[in-house]
Image: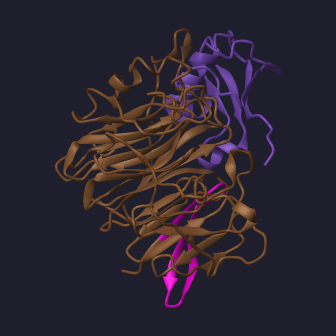
Chain colours: A brown, B purple
Amino acid sequence: MQPKLLVGTSKGLIIYKNNSKNWIIARVHFEGLPVSSLYIDERTNIWWVALSHRHWGEKLHFSEDAGNHWVEVKVPSFSNYFYKPGKPATLKKIWSMQQSGPDRPGGLWVGTEPGGLFHSDDHGKHFQLIEPLWNHPSRLDPAQWFGAGKDYPFIHSIVLDPRDSDHVYVGVSCAGVFETRDGGKSWQAKNMGLVAAYLPNPQVEIGHDPHRIILCPAHPEILWQQNHCGIFRTTNGGERWEDVSGKDGFPKYGFSLAIDDEDPDMAWVIPAHSDERRIPVNLKLTVCVTRDAGRNWTPIHQGLPAEPAFDLVLRHSFVKKGDALAFGTNNGNLYLSDDRGNSWRMISQNLPMVNYLAWA
Amino acid sequence: MAKVKFTSALKRYFPSLTELEIPGDSVKEALHNIDQQFPGIMTYLTEDNGQLRKHVNIFLKGELIKDRVTLNDPVNARDELLIFQALSGG
């Protein structure tokens, strides 16, 4: 089957298919509606799409037939939960979804804003808030859990250990990385080695801003993280993170990250110039690759614009599958590489803001 | 029975939505009864905790309802409820 690239944008879900040499738009779903999250359950090939309606709130849809028919399901609910004493919690946005392993066929995790983690054991028909994380003593401390560019902290990364469905990491902006080894019953912060340069004590236990976290499936003890304060990697399941940002500070800041499924030393980032500007460094849209666990980073420009660019690649807008990588930008540009990121070609310059990508 | 009219924007998600005659002594009861006929529409109009969504407006007898939190504005027979979305940019 020809691969498809699902592009979740601020104005709908756009499906690209590979038509021999070219990637062309095959279909548009949810026209005009902002896609907040996009996920394909590889066990069932169910497509999940979360939408952030301007007026009607967050909604969740799935398709069992690659988008021919969509079904709306009830979103995870904070009903009867409080963000803090006296302030009822309400769902603002679905940021992330993650299937459980094959041992939990109906298992599905959802990460939200405000920072709630939900689990379904029936393929998303019903969701339960994971109370041990919601009730983690750090969550009510505004110095430890706080919004980053949003009013509330949010869970944007849910990382499953492929060997053990009870072993899950989440990334919270802002709070940091938390790990459970018992399916969500207990949670431990895993932020040692990270830096929170925006706090009086940059080495706090909790209060970090991971932008994106990915685990290497072939080496599950190795995780990479694009953080607000650099690029980090752990070789011991988060016991300690090492700063692997470029030696001269490039690459360092950014949101998106891709890693190789097999080679734990290989990763790609798309750097941006600091949180104050959030544009390409020197206005040059660049993908950086490392093949040696971050000791050296090589900038790649081939196929990317030579003229000044102002694109930012958001955290879920950079994906890899096999030798193919793709990224979309906040300016509606879409780029694709067939050769592991060594060269790129522009697929479209006419999209809305790209929020989410997924390969199907 | 109050008469209820909806913004046409909601017809995208509830295609058979039309003007209704709905029982209920309060806005909350009226919305609950609308949800019986159009399951799920409450989640489009209200937050998890039951309060009206920020960008949804309900007019009762031509005036914005006063209680957006518990939706307890009283509704009388032959009152007219208008359910609209607030205007927004972008």
Is A23 within the magenta?
yes
Q: Residue A26 appears at what percent x and percent y? A: 55, 76
| Magenta segment, prevailing SS (helix, strand or loop) | strand
Residue A21 vs A236, above or below: the answer is below
Tally of numbered tags: 0
Residue in front for this viewpoint, A269 or B14: A269
Which segment did they paint magenta? Answer: A5-26
Q: Residue A58 appears at what percent x and percent y? A: 56, 39
Query: What residue sits 60% from the left and 29% below the top?
Result: A199
Q: Residue B50 appears at what percent x and percent y? A: 56, 20
Query: Looking at this rendering, what residue extends furthest in the bottom direction?
Result: A20
Query: What residue sits 42% from the left and 39% below the top?
Result: A193
Say left or right for A339 vs A152: left
Residue in front for this viewpoint, B86 or A149: A149
Say left or right for B64 vs A4: right
Say left or right for A53 vs A288: right
Q: Is residue A117 visible?
A: yes
Q: Is residue A126 visible?
A: no
Query: Looking at this rendering, what residue extends furthest in the front direction?
Result: A247
Query: What residue sits 21% from the left and 33% below the top?
Result: A182
Query: Looking at this rendering, what residue extends furthest in the left direction?
Result: A103
Residue A319 vs A249, above or below: the answer is below
Residue in front for this viewpoint, A109 or A274: A274
Residue A325 vs B49, above or below: the answer is below
Q: Residue A143 appears at what percent x and percent y? A: 55, 21
Check the picture and name the quadrant holding the C terminus of chain A.
Answer: bottom left
Query: What residue sits 70% from the left and 25% below the top?
Result: B3
